[in-house]
Image (spheres, helix red, strand yellow):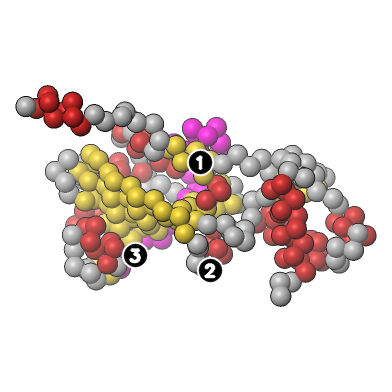
């Protein structure tokens, strides 16, 4: 049986999602809910802290607990990888999403760990390696303010990244232009990539790490990045909180029949 604070948090979360408490509305003062028999002061406080951790409300001194605006971040498709952003500027992919969404950002909202690991089967297959071969795993947790939005772990062959900033665990992108600029400077200019997406139920660890509300799925991303010669220089796995992103793709519609006619 769920604790009393969890039941209250779920009840309030449902009222928020149904529009009973719309974005910008203030939730009742803790004393009001205590007087309504919703629980003790500690119970209501714990419920409000849970709602805040789940990204549904913000609490500030003097303003009480207010329902957050629930506009998801744009998660750009092709445009987030534009070379002009990272090669000629300093707009790495997660920052490109924030700019397109009209949202603020701090570079240290991305943190990471870097380690040399044995390649899992999926990673090994993407890189054309034997399972268990050594690869560098650069695991990032990205937040918007205090709320996690997603994780992203990039796997690299050691010969591509050793001695570069990609194996430096300092918080934030790997220097000006981020990881793709590092690869570019090392002689591995990215040319094309493949992304695969699927939704699933999160693991218990993902629920905790991403501070997911009950029942929220995650979107798992697999991204394979190639040079023009077809060399895989990055294979990445991202885990995204489903409600915190709107995936946006803008692309030219292919006409393979016309392309074929032109080559004949």
Q: Which quadrant does the C terminus fall into? A: top left
Residue 85 visible in the displayed image: no
Q: Position of residue 263 (x, y in %)?
A: 9, 27
Q: Position of residue 204 (x, y in %)?
A: 53, 68
Lateral position of residue 101 relative to residue 87, left or right: right
Residue 52, numbered label:
none
State which region is magenta.
Answer: 95-117
Is residue 22 highlighted in magenta?
A: no
User: What distance separates the C-alpha of mark 3 from that of mark 1?
Assistant: 31 Å
Circle 1 sits on which residue? 246
Q: Position of residue 82 (x, y in %)?
A: 33, 33
Residue 255 vertical placement versus 81 (above, below): above
Residue 115, numbered label:
3
* Residue located at (77% from left, 45% from top): 20
The secondary element bearing badge 3 is classed as strand
The secondary element bearing badge 1 is classed as strand
Circle 2 sits on which residue? 204
């Amino acid at each position: 049986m769920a604790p009393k604070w969890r039941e209250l948090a779920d009840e309030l979360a449902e009222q928020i999602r149904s529009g009973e408490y719309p974005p910008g509305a203030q939730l009742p003062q803790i004393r009001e809910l205590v007087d309504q028999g919703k629980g003790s002061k500690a119970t209501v406080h714990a419920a409000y802290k849970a709602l805040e951790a789940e990204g549904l409300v913000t609490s500030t001194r003097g303003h009480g607990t207010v329902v957050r605006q629930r506009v998801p971040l744009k998660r750009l498709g092709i445009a987030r990888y534009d070379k002009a952003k990272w090669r000629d500027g300093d707009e790495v992919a997660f920052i490109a999403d924030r700019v397109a969404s009209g949202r603020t950002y701090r570079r240290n909202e991305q943190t990471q760990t870097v380690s040399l690991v044995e390649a899992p089967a999926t990673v090994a297959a993407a890189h054309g390696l034997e399972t268990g071969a050594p690869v560098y795993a650069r695991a990032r947790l990205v937040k918007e303010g205090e709320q996690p939005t997603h994780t992203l772990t990039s796997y690299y062959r050691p010969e591509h990244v050793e001695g570069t900033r990609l194996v430096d665990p300092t918080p934030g992108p790997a220097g000006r232009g981020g990881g793709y600029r590092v690869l570019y400077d090392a002689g591995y200019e990215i040319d094309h990539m493949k992304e695969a997406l699927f939704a699933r139920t999160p693991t218990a660890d993902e629920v905790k790490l991403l501070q997911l509300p009950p029942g929220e799925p995650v979107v798992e991303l697999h991204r394979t990045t190639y040079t023009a010669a077809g060399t895989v220089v990055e294979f990445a796995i991202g885990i995204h909180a489903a409600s915190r992103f709107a995936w946006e793709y803008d692309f030219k519609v292919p006409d393979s029949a016309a392309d074929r006619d032109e080559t004949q």
